[in-house]
Amino acid sequence: MTTLTATGAPAQAMNERAHEACPKCRRPCAPGDRACARCGLLARRFAAYAAALAAEEAAEPPELSRAWSACRERWSEPALHDAALDAATKLERLPALARRYREALDRDPADEVAARRLAQLKTLIETAARAQARAVDSPGAARALWAMGYLFAAAIFIASLWAAAIALRRHG
């Protein structure tokens, strides 16, 4: 008899998947994990994310691939890493380049070049995301909120006058 999980997936498939590493951040998943503890990707979405990632990598622009290959050939030359960063920036593929540096760091955790470049990319990506984020600016909503506040204050004032008038009639 096949046991089903809460999502309807066979428990055996869920247990096999739990031994995989997360395709998004490559953190090993413990048996029974429903999501990656680092990035939050649900375990049931691992396969779909991995497929989308593979499709993205297959469609990678040749310019970025060439720049990365040059980096790998002469890893210690900063100019080649700068060229790869320039190519990724122009192609709007900074996350793809960051993924390559993360993979290099996974292979060799003591790799200072990969660690430094990954930190640089993290800063660039965060800065770009903040620059693209727009503050919600709705003057109409602000006016409506002010109007509701004035109406509420006016209603309280009128209710206070009415309560005062009733109190004066009873005592007067």
Image: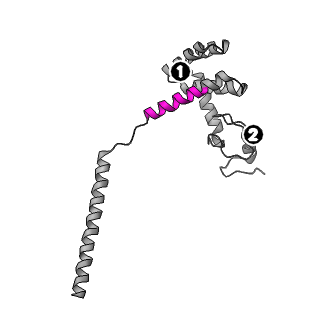
Work out whether residue 80 or residue 61 is closer to the camera in this orientation and state it: 80
Classify residue 151 by image quadrant: bottom left
Query: In the displayed structure, would residue 89 be above or below residue 32?
Result: above
Q: How is the image coloured?
A: one colour
* Residue identified by numbered label 1: 88
Work out whether residue 58 or residue 76 is closer to the camera in this orientation and state it: 76
Q: How dense is the environment of label 1, judged by Cα within 10 Å: few (below 14), some, or many (20 and up)? A: many
Please tell me whether mark 2 sits on a helix, a strand or a loop.
loop
Q: Which mark is residue 149?
A: none
- Say what amino acid the circle numbered 1 marks: Ala
Q: Which residues are magenta?
A: 118-132
Q: Residue at x 61, y 17 (%)?
A: 68
**Which quadrant is home to the C terminus?**
bottom left
* Residue identified by numbered label 2: 19
Query: In the displayed structure, would residue 64 be above or below residue 23?
Result: above
**Can residue 56 be seen from the camera position used here?**
no
Classify residue 157 by image quadrant: bottom left
Please tell me whether mark 1 sits on a helix, a strand or a loop.
helix
For this view, does 45 lie left or right of residue 153? right
- Secondary structure mostly seen in magenta is helix
Q: Residue at x 69, y 23 (%)?
A: 111
**Can residue 37 be seen from the camera position used here?**
yes
Q: Residue at x 70, y 51 (%)?
A: 5
- Say what amino acid the circle numbered 2 marks: His
Q: Does 119 appear in magenta?
A: yes
For this view, does 2 lie left or right of residue 120? right
For this view, does 153 lie left or right of residue 15? left
Of badges 1 and 2, the one in the foreground is: 1
Query: In the displayed structure, would residue 56 be above or below residue 78?
Result: below
